[in-house]
Image (spheres, rainbow, N blue to C red):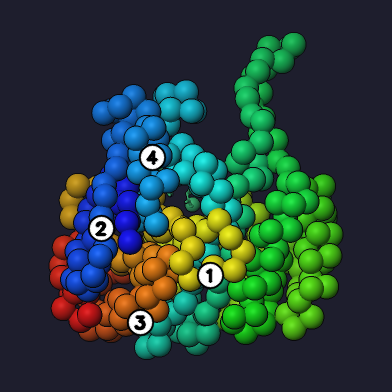
Amino acid sequence: MRIAVFAGDGIGPEVTEQAVRVLQALEINGLELVEGDVGGAAYRKHGHPLPAQTLEIARSADAILFGAVGDFSLDHLERALRPEQAVLGLRKELGLFANLRPATVFKGLEDLSTLRPEVAGKIDLLIVRELNGDVYFGEKGTRTLEDGRRQGWDMMSYAEDEVRRIAHAGFKAAQGRRGKLCSVDKANVLETSQLWRDVVIEVSAQYPDVQLTHMYVDNAAMQLVKNPGAFDVIVTGNLFGDILSDQASMCVGSIGLLASASLAETDGAQGAFGLYEPIHGSAPDIAGKGLANPMATILSAAMLLRHSCGMEAEAARIEAAVAAALADGVKGGDLGGSAGTKEIGDAVIARL
Ligand code: NAD
Ligand code: IPM
Ligand code: MN
C-alpha cells in the first residue's frame, strides 16, 4: 500500500505528523508513505497549490492522507492559485465525489459536547456530502454593472447523474447502518434542490429497505442541535454538507474530532481509493504552537485503513485508542483541556 501524505499549511503538518506516527506505530507490513506539497506551502515552493508532481504522487498512490490547506496571506491571489484549490483540485481531478463525515459521540464522552449530555449521547450520524458539484464548481465571476456597482456571482447547479450517484452512496450507507436516510435540500426555493429531491426520490425505488425523508437545510441545522439522535444518514449537496458538518462537529465536541473520507464510488467498498482528511482547516490562529488537536487526522487515518486498505481491525484499534485517551482526560484546548499536539499523539499511541 502506497499512502500519499499531503500535510499542507498551518496546523496541517502538525496534525499529520501525529497521524503518521500512529500509522507507523501499528507496524503494518508493506505500508509505504510518500510525501507531497499542497496548498500555500506548495505555492511558495512551486508556484502552484497543486503542482503536477503532487497530482502524480496522488495518482500513483492507493490512498491520500491530507492535513489542511489555507493561508490568509495568500488570499489576494487569483482564485486558481489559492491554497484551497489543492483540496478542491484533488477532489475534482480524482473524481472523489462521495464525502463521508461521521459524527458519533463516544460512550461516556457525552460531556465533550456543547449540547446537554442526554441530547449528545444519542448522536451517531453520518453526513454524506456531495463533493464534485454544486455552487463550488459552477461558473463564477465578478463584474461591474452598468450603474457602476460591483457584483459577484457563483452558479449553483447539479446534473441528474451527479445527484444520482451521491444518492446511491447515501442509500448504501444507510443500508449498512440503521436504514434511515434524510436528504437535505432547499427545494422550496432552489431549482437545483428540486431536481435533487426528484432524483433522490427516483433512486429510492431501488432501496425499499431504507426509510427516506426530506428536510430543508434551515430546519436540518435546527434539528441537528435540537434532536441530533434522530439522524442516521444525511445526504446533501456540497455547500450544505460543508456547513452542516462543521455544526455536527460541535454537537460531538469539537471540530478537532471529526474525520472524513472522500471516495470515488458509491459503496465505500474495501480497497477503494480515497482521500482522508480532518474536516477542519489550517487554523492559522493556533498554527505553529503545538496546540492543535490531531485526533481528527488520526481518526482520518483510521478511515483510510478501513476503506482503502481493508484493515477494519487496525482502524477499530485506532478509534478505540482515541476514545480511551479522551476517556482518560487527554484533551486539547479545543475541548477545554491542556494537552498539546504531540502529547495527544503520544497518548493515542500508548493506548493502541
Ligand atoms: P478552521 O477549521 O481552520 O478553524 C476554525 C476554528 O477551529 C479556529 O478557531 C481553529 O483554531 C479551530 N480548530 C480547527 N481545527 C482545530 C484543531 N485540530 N484543534 C484545535 N482547534 C482547531 O477554519 P477557518 O478558520 O475558517 O479557516 C482557516 C483556513 O483553513 C482558511 O484558509 C480555510 O479556507 C482553510 N480550510 C481548509 C480546509 C481543508 O483543508 N480541507 C477546511 C476548512 C478550512
Ligand atoms: C472542507 C473545507 C473546504 C470545503 C474548503 C477549504 C475548500 O471547508 O473541507 O470542509 O469547503 O470543502
Ligand atoms: Mn468545511
Q: Determine the image quadrant of residue 296.
A: bottom left
Sequence-wise, which precedes: disc 4 or disc 1? 4
Mark 2 to mark 1: distance in Å?
21 Å
Which amino acid lies under the numbered mark 4 shown in the image of this protein?
Glu
Sequence-wise, which precedes: disc 3 or disc 2? 2
Q: Is the residue under label 3 in contact with that under label 1 (CB below 8 Å)?
A: no
Provide the secondary structure element on which disc 2 rests: strand
Provide the secondary structure element on which disc 3 rests: helix
Q: Badge 3: how crowded within 10 Å, few (<14), some, or many (20+)? A: few
Which amino acid lies under the numbered mark 3 shown in the image of this protein?
Ala
Find out if the beta carbon at label 1 lies less than 8 Å from the nearest ligand 2 atom. Answer: no
Name the residue rendered at 55%, 75% in the picture.
Answer: 125
Name the residue rendered at 56%, 48% in the picture.
Answer: 95
Name the residue rendered at 22%, 80% in the picture.
Answer: 352
Label 4 or label 3, whichever lies nearer to me, is 4
Q: Is the residue under label 2 in contact with that under label 3 (CB below 8 Å)?
A: no
Q: Determine the image quadrant of residue 317.
A: bottom left
Q: Is the residue under label 4 in contact with that under label 2 (CB below 8 Å)?
A: no
Question: Horizontally, is 305 left or right of 217 in the view?
Answer: left
Residue denoted by label 1: 269
Which amino acid lies under the numbered mark 2 shown in the image of this protein?
Glu
Q: Determine the image quadrant of residue 163.
A: bottom right
Which amino acid lies under the numbered mark 1 shown in the image of this protein?
Ala
Name the residue rendered at 54%, 52% in the picture.
Answer: 96
Residue denoted by label 2: 32
Residue denoted by label 4: 56
Sequence-wise, which precedes: disc 1 or disc 3? 1
In this picture, is 82 found above or below 91?
above
